[in-house]
Amino acid sequence: MIYEVVIGVEVHAQLRTKSKLFCGCGTVFGLTANSQTCPLCLGLPGSLPVLNQAAVEMAVRAGLALNCTIAANNMFARKNYFYPDLPKGYQISQYEAPICEHGWIEIAVNESRRRVRIRRAHLEEDAGKSVHVAGTNGSRVDLNRAGTPLLEIVTEPDLRSSEEVVAYLKSLRDVLMYLEVCDGNMDEGSFRCEPNLSLRPLGQKEFGTKVELKNINSFKFVKDAIEYEIKRQTKVLSEGGTINQETRLWNLERGETVVMRSKEEAHDYRYFPDPDLVPLKLDKEWIDGCRKHVAELPVTRMRRFVSEFALSEYDAGVLTASKAVADYFEACVTLFNQPKTVSNWVMGELTRELNNSGTDASASPVAPERLVSLLQLVEQGTISLKVAREIFPEVYSSGKTPEQIVQEKGLIQVSDEVALDKIIGDVIEKNPTQVAQFKEGKQQVLGFLVGQVMKTSGGKANPGKVNELLKKKLG
Ligand code: ADP
Ligand code: MG
Ligand code: ZN
């Protein structure tokens, strides 16, 4: 029997608001436990929620970018369950009337592009965290995260492989980061994903029973967990078994998914409209106002880079994957109108240094102006391209300007004919065999001789000039 994989994904994206969804407490990650709390997010009786407008704006911006319909009327519901990190005994979420519905996002897998449908995106508050300190008894509860605004984004079951899921997650994360509504940090839990996965015999219309996967905090684990789960379900079904509807956790050490709980149904949560919050009405003008703040998105920007800067789709795709990198690239091109050269440097030398030091392009110690000043030194013939590449790590790490480094190290390119003549004369003298071969018509020997001159000059000779002078000398 051949099975088809069916996957739908739920993502919880933390919105980048300064304060929580229903109180004024801050949302900074990693502070002392319970230092960011108040009676409301501690769930004390008598406290009343007030909706954070910035969170609504961010949700609407994300919804518009994801081609969703924005609900003019939406409301908040209580999702009831008991857990130590949820002191109120319910989570405020949206159930019947989510803020965004019926959208789509484009993904690219193996050169082909297609749409994945977004079923809904709704606002909800995050829960706190249970903390287990090794060597101590019991668990502790940190409520700093309780009440932080989340946008839960749910796809239709449109995905068919782990590659598609990863492509979807990357596109979605790019969009949210571009819009500056989510910082996308997977280690800190700002972008959490839960794939739902089922199998069905190829050709069958009805979906099989799905399993929800949790505890996946990197793209690599998404792929590993899905591949594992496909194998597990295939085995169960092939042996005539049935899949239990359940939530399974990805266990990194064991490289397998492990049952966490059997899946609860919606009615288990006893959803009902939150009587403390009035229905939220958004008028058309206000939604249109949000539309103006929807930034140019990665795919659009990629297409513009191809047409405006004559870059390949591949290069444009790499440059626009991160907003910070794309901004950096454009800032350079404004100062130095050679897009292909800039693109090579940004994707090559700069990216290498940023990756090595774990730095985001927005915080690059080499600002666009400084990179451009290095490119101008090459352009003017002051230094060779080779020297420029060699000194870049120092430009990056020392805080010195390229000019300073070039001066200090005496790296100024030799274009002066008298100086070059002398080196060329020496090289000709030392390599009579190659010179004879060249004179017999073996053109490719010229490259060797140019190389010798470059070497003797310590890489400082201007290769164009060397070529020209050598040819002249050898007649
Ligand atoms: P639940 O109520 O169990 O959370 P939902 O209907 O809300 O289930 O769907 C949650 C996610 O699971 C959605 O992304 C949806 O596309 C996906 N999904 C639903 N049914 C299936 C299925 N049979 N196989 C794979 N994914 C599914
Ligand atoms: Mg669900
Ligand atoms: Zn609070």
Image (cartoon, rainbow, N blue to C red):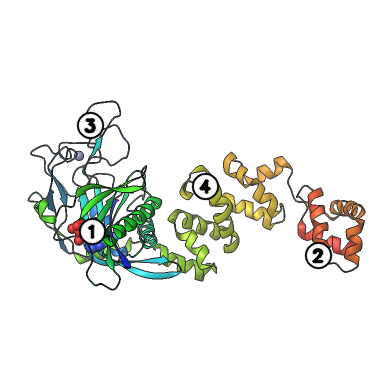
* Nearer to the camera, 353 or 326: 353
Is the C-beta separation of discs 3 and 1 under 8 Å? no
In the rendered image, which quarter is residue 321 located in?
A: bottom left
Q: Quadrant of ligand 1?
A: bottom left
Q: CA distance from mark 2 to mark 1?
A: 69 Å
Left or right position of 218 against 206: right
Tell which residue pokes out farthest to the front in this image. 239
Q: Is residue 54 visible?
A: no
Residue at (17% x, 64% y) in the render: 72
**Label 3 vs 4, first from the N-terminus:** 3
Disc 2 target residue? 444
Disc 3 target residue? 140
Q: Position of residue 8 (x, y in %)?
A: 28, 61
* Nearer to the camera, 360 or 442: 442
* Tag 3 secondary structure: strand
Q: Is residue 333 visible?
A: yes
Q: What amino acid is labelled 2 in the image?
A: Gln
Q: CA distance from mark 3 to mark 2?
A: 74 Å
**Label 4 vs 1, first from the N-terminus:** 1
* Tag 1 secondary structure: loop
Left or right position of 43 against 146: left
Q: CA distance from mark 3 to mark 1?
A: 40 Å
